[in-house]
Image: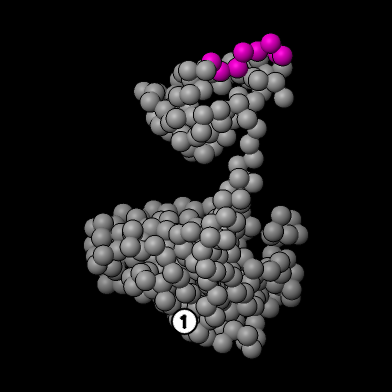
Amino acid sequence: MNKTQLHLQNLLLLIKEAGSMAELARRCGYDNSASLSQIKRRLEIQSDDENGRGIRASLLAKLESGMGKRKGWMNREHDLEAEQRKKEAAASAAIPQHTNKPVLDFQSAEGRVAMVSRNTSETQISVAINLDGTGQSHFDTGVPFLEHMMDQIARHSLIDIDITCKGDVHIDDHHTVEDIGITLGQALKQALGDKAGIRRYGHAYVPLDEALSRVVIDLSGRPGLSYNVEYTRAIIGRFDVDLFGEFFAGLVNHSMMTLHIDNLQGKNAHHQAETIFKAFGRALRMAVEFDDRMAGRMPSTKGTLSA
């Protein structure tokens, strides 16, 4: 790999890490992304030129500094996924592993059961679920309002859910809420297996006084979230409502479902949130149920929902 190709590869990694060319430009002190777009285009044109000069040193330093990279980062090859796995492994080794067993009985439970643990330097989480349960739940997370909402999921989906989390809530609830969504999504994916014979799709409208929400689910194997909620206030109790979006994003990305959430109306933020979680539970119940007419067949013309 020549210098131009290396710089192009690392520039693309920085764009991915920042989320967009515009965000990378912002972090590195540019008013707009046009100059970075021009550099990217030049690197692409010169990528096969062994004499290509790549990115000049002053800009390399600016990119590295803006993205918090060590000096010389742009001149080395990187595998960001491998580096992240290495960081997570180091973090897990540095903290006591979270080994709490579920309070509910999952060992002898019949049905589609999954038990997942996830340990990082920010949160240590254990999740156990039974898709064929009765709606029992147990939560110990340090975030009471999230527990109230997850109880709605269990009650209305008839999925048994047991979640224990020790998180850095002394900072704020963000890591705990997001990581619970991630781990619950992993457990759902594991419990669903190959998804043969399930209904796959689920939907529900749920009202609560003046509030009304619609949730539609496709256990598609493709993560996608459409989240259209305008809460009437930013805080419920001490809970930041923005974190519900992080919860569902983590759940969607790791369960590999497509999820549409629309709060159609509402004036009370608590009511808005409760209708969303109740509707999610109802839609999830429909989607994970077995369809007698499918008789174990895959609910997809592709023949798979996991590839």
* Residue on which disc 1 sits: 137
Q: Which residues are magenta?
A: 49-56
Q: x, y percentage for residue 286?
A: 55, 73
User: Would you say the magenta stretch is mainly helix, strand or loop?
Assistant: loop
**Extreme top residue here?**
51
Q: Residues within 10 Å of mark 1 (few under 14, many from 20)?
A: many
Place of residue 113 in the rendered image (x, y in percent of width and height, measured from the top left): 62, 78
Q: Amino acid at mark 1?
A: Ser
Q: Is residue 290 magenta?
A: no
Q: Is residue 196 visible?
A: yes
Q: Quadrant of residue 129?
A: bottom right
Residue at 48 percent across and 59 percent down: it is: 121
Locate the C terminus and report the quarter of the image it occupies. Answer: bottom right
Question: How far from the left and from the top, in percent, is residue 130?
Answer: 58, 79
Q: Residue at x 53, y 15 (%)?
A: 56
Q: Point out the residue furthest to the front here.
A: 94
The structure residue drawn at horizontal position 33% and vertical position 63%, both measured from the top left corner, is: 170
Q: Is residue 119 left or right of residue 138?
A: right
The residue that appears at 42% across and 65% down in the rendered structure is 167
Q: Quadrant of the N terminus?
A: top right
In depth, the one of 279 and 146 nearer the eye is 146
Report if residue 54 lies within the magenta region.
yes
Is 235 situated above or below 197?
above
